[in-house]
Amino acid sequence: MSKRTKWDTKGDLDESKNLPIYQHKATLQQAVKDNSFLVVTGETGSGKTTQLPQYLHQAGFWSNGKIGITQPRRVAAITVAQRVSQEMHCSLGREVGYQVRFDDCTTQDTVVKYMTDGCLLREILADPVLSHCVLCALLPDKASKGRCVPLKVVVMSATLETDKLSVFLGGCPVFTIPGRTFPVTSKFSCAIGPKDTESSVYVKEVVKVALDVHTSEMAGDILVFLTGQSEIEKACDMLYEKAESIDYRYDVQDHKVEGLLILPLYGSMPTDQQKQIFQPPPPGIRKCVVATNIAATSLTINGIKYIVDSGFVKQLNHNSRVGMDILEVVPISKSEALQRAGRAGRTSAGKCFRIYSPAFWEKCMPEYTVPEIQRTSLTAVILTLKCLGVHDVIRFPYLDRPEERFILEALKQLYQCDAIDRRGKVTRLGELMVEFPLPPGLTRALLQAASLGCEDLLLPVAAMLSVENIFIRPGHPEKQKEADKKHRQLGVQAGSCNDFTMLLSVFEKCKASDAPSAWCKDNYIHWRALKSAFSVETQLREILLRLQKKRDFPMEKFDGNKSELFRRCLCTGYFTNVARRYGLFKTKSHPHRSLFDQEAQLDWVIFHDLLVTSRIYIRTVCPIRYDWVKDLLPKLHEVDVYELSSVAREEVTDEEVAKWVTKEAAKRQTEGSAEDVF
Ligand code: CDP
C-alpha cells in the first residue's frame, strides 16, 4: 500500500515536556529578565523556537509589549505559529499569530508573533523604537542603544557561532541547552560524481535509494533532501508509482512496515499540507518526506531515522558581472551535509545515505555555506538601511560583512532605479519604493505605471511575479503536450508575444470567470497560485492607495497606445535586464531562451530574471524598442560607484543615530503609527 492522502491524528502536545529545553525553563525566564541581550544555543529541534516564547509568555513578558520571533523562511513562521497556538490552546491569529509577506494572520490580541526577518524590518521602518516589541531574534543595530522602551533581544541559534553573536551584542551571556543526539552513520555511493549536475540523474537516484531504504531497513521515517518544487513533485510521482508495486509479503525486510506515505515539503506549499508533515504516520506506515533545505535547519520533523541526501541545493546567488541574483542548483557545503545527516539522530541512532561519491565531497563541496547576505543582492537591504537613517552603509556593523563591491553594486542599482541620488541620499521615489515588498526594478515599473495612471496594468503583473509558478506542467508526456498547447493558446489570446501581457491576461481572465477554479484546471494553471496572486494584488493596491494619498506622489502624462505604455513602464524598471538577440546586453556570453522560444522574431527584449541550470535561461520576457531604453542605458555606466558611496563614507556618530531615533519616535507618536500590512 502506498498513501499520500490526509489523515487525522493529533500530535502529542505533551511532547513539549520531553524537549531538552524544558528542564531549563525557569533559568531561561530568569536570564531574559536579567539581561537585555541574550544568546541561546542548542541543537536544531531542542525547542528554542516553539518553547522559549511560551516560557516568556508564561513569565508575563507580554504585558510590556509583544513577543516577536523572526524566522528566516515564511513556511517556518507559519507552521511554528500553528504548532504554538495548538500548544497554547488558542486559535491561530489570536494570542499567537504570524505575519509573512502578503499574509498577516494577527489581530489586536496577538502577543506572540512569528514573522519573517523582512516583516520585522518593515516594523522597524514604521516604528523605529519597536515600542511594542520585547523580544526579537533579529540582531539589533547600534541604534538600539537609543531606544526608549527596554527592548529585550534573544538570539536563538543552532550554530557554533555563539561567540561571534555574543561579541556582536556587546559581550552578552550565552545560554547553552545541552543536546542529546544519537550517532548517525553516513554512507557515500558512487552514483553522483563531480560532473553530474543534471536534475534527472539525481532525482532518479534519490528515488532509487529511498525505495531501497523502505524495503531493506527497519521501521523509521525517511527524509529526502532535494532541490526545489518541480524536482520534489517529480520524485514524489516516481516514488508513488514504484511503491504501488511493492508486495509487502515478500519485498520488505521489516514485516511491521505495511505501507509508505509520501509527502512533499517545499516553501510555497499550501499551509494545510505543510501541517501533515509534522503528524506521526498511522501505525504500520512509514513516512517519507521529500523536502527542500527548509527541513535541514528551519523545520524539525520528528521520527526521522533515515536521510537520503541528493547533495544539491537550489540557491540564490548574486552574480555581480550580470548585476542580478541568479537561482542556481549548486552542491551543498560539507557543514550543510553534516546538518542534513544530523536530522536522523534526534531520537535514536540513524543512517544517512549520500547519493554522491567521496570524490564529489572532496572536489565539489565547500567547507561552509556562505551566509545569504554575502551572496544575494543587497539592494533591498541597503535601501531599508538608508531609509532607517543609516547613511554609512559600508561601515555599518554587519554581523556577516558583505563584500564592499556588492554594497557598491547595490548602490549603483538603487541609483539606476532612481531610489538614491548621486550622493547616495534616498530620493522621494526611494522612500516610496521601500514600502513595497518587491524587487526594486519591479517596484520602479509599478510606480512609473501609477504615475501615468495605468497601475491596473502593472499591479496584477507584480502580484503574479510574487507568487509561485502559475503554469502547471504535468509529468505525463501526453498531458504535457496538452498543457503546452493550452498555454500557447493563452499566449495567443493575450495578443502579443509578451510574457508580462500573458500574466496580466491570465490574471484578468481568471478573475472574470464565473468558475475560476474550473477555468484554471482546464487551462493547466495553478488555482492556488492565482488565488494568492489575487490577494497579493489587493495588498499592493492598498499600499499604493495609501502612498497616492500623500501630497507629492509623482504624476506624468503619456499619449501613446496602451501596449506601448505598458512596455515603456516595464522598461523604466527593467532596463538593467535588457537583452538583444544572440546575446545579453550586459552579458554577451549567455544564450537566452524564454517560455516558448517566442523571441525567435524578437530583437530587443527586457526580462524579469535569469535561471541557471545546466543551461542559462532568461525568464518572463517582453519585446521592446531600442528607442525606449536608449536614454536610460547610459545610466548603467554614468556614475562612479565611489561617488555614490561618498555619503556612505561620512562618519555617523552613535549620538547622531540616537538623536535620529528619538526624533523619529516623537514624530510617529504625533502622527500615529501607519498601518502596516506586512
Ligand atoms: O527551535 P529549535 O530548532 O530548537 O526547535 P523547535 O523548532 O522549537 O522544535 C521543537 C519540537 O517541536 C520538534 O520536536 C519539532 O518536531 C516540533 N514541531 C512540531 O511538531 N511542529 C511544528 N510546526 C514545529 C515544531
Image (cartoon, helix red, strand yellow):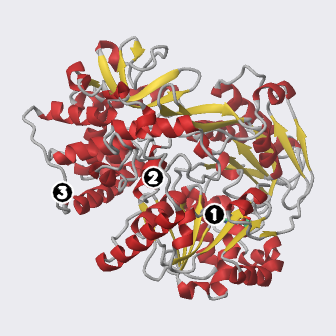
Residue 70 visible in the snapshot: yes
Give the mark, 1 or 3, whose residue is nearer the N terminus. 1
For numbered disc 2, what is the local secondary structure?
Answer: loop
Figure quadrant, ligand 1: bottom right
User: On screen, 627 above or below 30?
Assistant: above
Q: Nearer the viewer, residue 177 or 45?
A: 177
For numbered disc 3, what is the local secondary structure?
Answer: loop
- In the picture, measured across the screen, residue 86 lies left or right of residue 254, that is left
Number of marks in the rendered image:
3
Type of residue at label 3? Asp
Q: Nearer the viewer, residue 278 or 111?
A: 111
- In the picture, measured across the screen, residue 239 lies left or right of residue 256, that is left
Q: Residue at x 10, y 37 (%)?
A: 558
Give the mark, 2 or 1, whose residue is nearer the N terminus. 1
Type of residue at label 1? Trp
Provide residue 330's location: percent of width, then percent of height.
66, 31
Provide residue 130's location: percent of width, then percent of height.
48, 73
| Residue that mark 2 sits on | 391
Residue 247 visible in the snapshot: no
Give the mark, 3 or 2, whose residue is nearer the N terminus. 2
Q: Distance from label 3 to label 2 (Cα)?
A: 24 Å
Is the CB–ligand 1 distance for label 2 below 8 Å? no
Badge number at residue 552: 3
Can you say which quadrant of the picture contains the C terminus?
bottom left
For numbered disc 1, what is the local secondary structure?
Answer: loop
| Residue that mark 1 sits on | 7
Which label lies toward us, 2 or 1? 2
